[in-house]
């Protein structure tokens, strides 16, 4: 029986809602610009300049539309604006103007004291404007370059992105390539927002474009993992455009996790140790997998499928669903079949747990069909004569036949010679 299909459309994502709101704002801005232009023309139509504008209303409308296009173009050409950069821009400008005001006051006192304010009024004004531009520039660049440490100067003023609620999860490159984070997240265990830094995506893209086949496969798997996390409706996944300082990706991850107060999620043991040294919370998926493995104690009964031979004679090796290796004694004959076994002991190795078990109701091994080698025939020796019962002396040696003397030819058997013919 087929399940009825859900004809309801999928709910729009947060990014789609933002795009809709932005287009509504652009349309509202255009309408308001035209309305303000029309009101200006109607209001000024009573005087001479207003009449001139009313006569060339089409030119005023074109200028208004050009102004609208310039503003919207700036908006479209800068889609990745950062709130931290805008805050730094405003704060640096304010600091530069404040410093310019103070220095201008000092300049005015100096010029009035020495009566330079009348003769050099225009050059002094030019100097003030250039001084203000320079100080505003220095203020903006200083705040942009030192925004990570700005809180040390002014408490409670920070340009880093802050996340509300529980501590967010910061994913590194290895955990995205591993891809087990998707199955874990589907269980609903993660209620905190998931953050993927932009520089991690850049590293995965570099791997995906590599000439090495293994690196290319890893990079593509990591990018596929990001795509699945973003399209999961149960997860709050976001891309962070922050660019923390650091020599490598690992060091930048540690600095970024400390800046935003996030938990670093990784499968890299070295990175986990570095984060622990820096007193950062770390979630290692390898340790989580070890903790979630089946706890098999001595005496537990397990159903094991023997997959291959063991290292010792007669041993069979099987695996649990979580990958734990089980070595079963006297189970070599059961390769390819499932048997019942009782756990005898378990040890922890560097590669994980290893369980030793013994089979229950061990079946008899099937008869071998290999031909048995036939014994080689041994030559038969004549039986030795049995010694006389009660004799203490060793048996006498067999008599050797006496040598026959050489035969001498008899006269009748002497060779005949052919007489020579006399002629």
Image: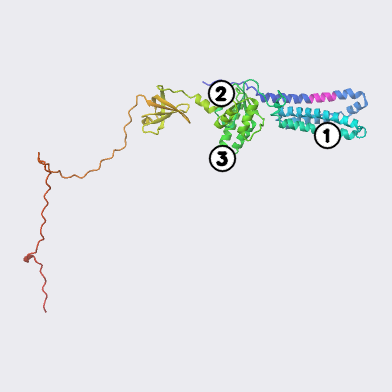
Name the residue furthest front. 113
Residue 164, given in percent of the width and then of the height, sits at 65, 21
Which residue corresponds to mark 1? Answer: 130
Q: Residues within 10 Å of mark 2 (few under 14, many from 20)?
A: few
Residue 32, given in percent of the width and then of the height, sits at 80, 24
Taking depth in this image into account, of 112 and 246 the one nearest to the observer is 112
Taking depth in this image into account, of 148 and 197 the one nearest to the observer is 148
Which residue corresponds to mark 3? Answer: 212
Under tag 3, what secondary structure?
Answer: loop
State the CA–CA distance, disc 3 to disc 1.
Answer: 55 Å
Residue 372 falls in which quadrant of the image? Answer: top left
Residue 375 falls in which quadrant of the image? Answer: top left
Residue 148, given in percent of the width and then of the height, sits at 69, 29
Which residue corresponds to mark 2? Answer: 186
Is most of the magenta stretch helix, strand or loop?
Answer: helix
Residue 106, given in percent of the width and then of the height, sits at 85, 30
- Whichever of labels 2 and 1 marks the residue nearer the N terminus, that label is 1
């Amino acid at each position: 029986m087929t399940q009825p299909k859900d004809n309801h459309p999928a709910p729009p994502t947060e990014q789609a809602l933002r795009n809709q709101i932005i287009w509504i704002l652009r349309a509202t801005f255009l309408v308001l610009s035209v309305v303000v232009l029309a009101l200006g023309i109607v209001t000024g139509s009573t005087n001479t300049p207003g009449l001139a504008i009313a006569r060339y209303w089409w030119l005023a409308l074109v200028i208004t539309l050009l102004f609208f296009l310039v503003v919207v173009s700036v908006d479209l050409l800068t889609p990745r604006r950062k709130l931290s950069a805008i805050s730094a821009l405003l704060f640096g400008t304010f600091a530069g103007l404040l410093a310019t005001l103070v220095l201008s006051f000092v300049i005015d006192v100096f010029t009035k004291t020495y009566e330079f304010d009348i003769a050099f009024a225009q050059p002094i004004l030019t100097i003030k404007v250039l001084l203000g531009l320079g100080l505003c520039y220095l203020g903006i660049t200083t705040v942009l370059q030192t925004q990570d440490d700005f809180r040390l100067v002014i408490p409670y003023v920070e340009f880093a992105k802050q996340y509300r609620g529980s501590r967010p999860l910061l994913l590194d490159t290895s955990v995205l390539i591993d891809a087990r984070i998707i199955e874990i997240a589907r269980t609903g265990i993660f209620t905190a927002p998931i953050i993927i830094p932009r520089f991690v995506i850049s590293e995965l893209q570099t791997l995906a474009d590599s000439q090495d086949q293994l690196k290319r496969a890893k990079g593509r798997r990591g990018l596929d993992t990001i795509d699945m996390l973003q399209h999961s409706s149960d997860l709050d996944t976001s891309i962070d455009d922050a660019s923390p300082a650091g020599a490598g990706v690992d060091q930048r991850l540690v600095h970024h996790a400390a800046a935003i107060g996030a938990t670093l999620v990784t499968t890299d043991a070295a990175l986990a140790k570095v984060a622990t040294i820096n007193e950062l919370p770390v979630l290692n998926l390898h340790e989580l997998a070890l903790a979630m493995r089946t706890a098999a104690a001595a005496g537990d009964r397990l159903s094991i499928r023997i997959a291959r031979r063991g290292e010792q004679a007669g041993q069979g090796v099987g695996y649990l669903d979580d990958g734990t290796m089980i070595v079963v004694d006297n189970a070599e004959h059961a390769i390819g079949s499932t048997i019942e076994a009782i756990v005898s002991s378990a040890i922890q190795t560097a590669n994980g747990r290893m369980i030793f078990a013994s089979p229950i109701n061990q079946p008899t091994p099937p008869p071998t069909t290999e031909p048995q080698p036939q014994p080689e025939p041994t030559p038969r020796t004549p039986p030795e004569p049995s010694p006389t019962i009660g004799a203490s002396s060793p048996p006498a040696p067999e008599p050797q036949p006496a040598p026959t003397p050489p035969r001498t030819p008899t006269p009748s058997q002497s060779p005949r010679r052919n007489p020579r013919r006399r002629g």
